Image (cartoon, grey):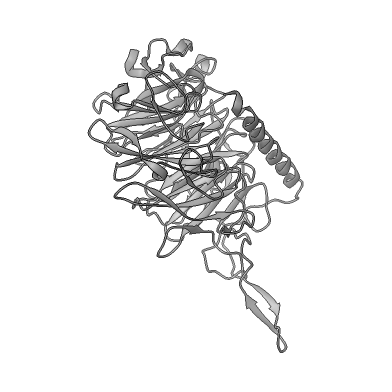
Amino acid sequence: MNNLLPMNRHRVTLVVLGLIAVLTLALAAGATAKPAKKPGSSSSEHVQPPVETSEGSLEQLPGRLGCLAEGKASVKLCGRARALKGPGPGVGSRAIAISPDGRNVYVAASGSDSIAVFDRSRATGALTQPKGKRGCVASVIGKAKGARECGLAIGLDGPNSVAVSPDGRNVYATARGGASVITFHRNRLTGQLRQLPPSASGCISGLPIPGCTAGRALKWPDVVVVSPDGKNVYVGDFAGSGVISFARAGKAGALTQLSGTAGCITEAGAEGCAKGVQMNHVEGLAINPSGTAVYAAAAFSSAVDFLARDASTGALSQSGCVTSEKVSGCSLGYEFGGVNALSFAPSGGDVYATSLTSNSLTTFQSLLGGVGVSQPPGPERQVEKEEGPGKETVAAPEGTPSPDGCTVFLRSPGCGFGRAMQAPEGLDVSPDGTSIYVAAFQTGAIDVFDRDPESGVVTQKPGPRGCVAPHKVHGCTLGRALGGAGSLVVSPDGKNVYSTAQFSNAVDVFRRIK
């Protein structure tokens, strides 16, 4: 891991720069909310203020049902949990996942070298952790006290992301310390996890770990996703600056890295991988519902990369990119510096991103007839005619912000106004497509946005319903055990939102008001 320390310092630098930018923006006087407009509306059109409704807002479950934690937070605020130290680390915006049947929640806890397992009440949304090996699985070399009674796994050193297969048979995890991808069989009745044996590649690693199969381009695997058809698993690698592709086979769900250049696409093109463009430090991945494309968020490139997927082989090929600064070969967007997480709307037409150094939530719309996305254009403007008297209306230059395409903490010219959204990390869209939730790492807030299912435009809820946060954050509904909120997920039935809190060593449980 010593060779990754410079990259850690680079990431800290990005955070510091982002915070400096936030302080600068805070000097702007009279910051007020500006509701987003429907795409295509005139800049002179009168915009109505947002209507304050309770639908989609969050209410933390009462008492100890509202959070489960290990350590200090469990003494007075939360129910007790094991193997839950450091969930949802700063690199790892998909550290929590829920099974398709809604019966279990899984959390990657990097400080415990473990995956914590929770049973979920589908009636109330409350979580309970089973005793013994049913309640967690931990690294064979882990030393965390809360993980001593867990099931054991090879390569689970510093896990940071988890994903559940569409058929509910498997849970896949990445572990940055082990440079590994770990495959677990999931008991669909009990939710218990059991690592596949070495013969079935229960661990694939870029390091020479006994019991793990060798993998290419695995340096610091961050995010993991499973294709909708269940045939492939894709991993975004932060330090390796690329995407690694695996075939998933049989009822066991065993993984095999695709051969040749189909097995990985990286910015450097090393280790026999295909060469990508603007893929510096991939931190987010999302697959469209049809399974025809994988989009990658490259934090250090401030780019979203478009990867076409061959459904028959699972192979990916880059077809383009959009960047927040003009780069040859990419289209130009706005306000997604340090982009780190992506999520599709249920319809697949819109993609949403959180960005660390921009302190923003941005909206992308799928291109018609092909793979790729673009942001809503900025407002048209009046200019003097080149010939003859008078003025004419022209389109805004590429990369001009629109409030339909960006919401930024405090203020940024041309964007919507965001509150309590400092250093946003994880996000998810509700199954009905009417709400978006964002976890803000610095403020510890869960931000709540209304989404127009037709236009895809988002607006943060006004007043206290627009965010749930610790007491130090003004203007939000008060929440508990939210220090370092980093990942979140909406339940398949749309009734609950679950989030991780790295500094509180907690999982927080919210009821979604309908």
Picture quarter containing residue 20?
top right
Q: Position of residue 263 (x, y in %)?
A: 40, 41
Picture quarter containing residue 201?
top left
Q: Position of residue 257 (x, y in %)?
A: 36, 36
Residue nearer the viewer, 406 or 450: 406
> Taking 455 as reference, is 112 above or below it?
above
Q: Position of residue 135 (x, y in %)?
A: 35, 18
Quarter that holds the N terminus? top right
Residue nearer the viewer, 145 or 62: 145
As drawn, the residue found furthest toward the bottom would be: 388
What residue appears at the point 68 percent right and 76 percent down from the top-left corner?
A: 382
- Tell whether 180 sits left or right of 375: left
- Tell whether 232 sits left or right of 17: left
What residue appears at the point 45 percent right and 55 percent down from the top-left corner?
A: 350
Q: Position of residue 69 (x, y in %)?
A: 48, 20
Quarter that holds the C terminus? top left
Picture quarter containing residue 148?
top left
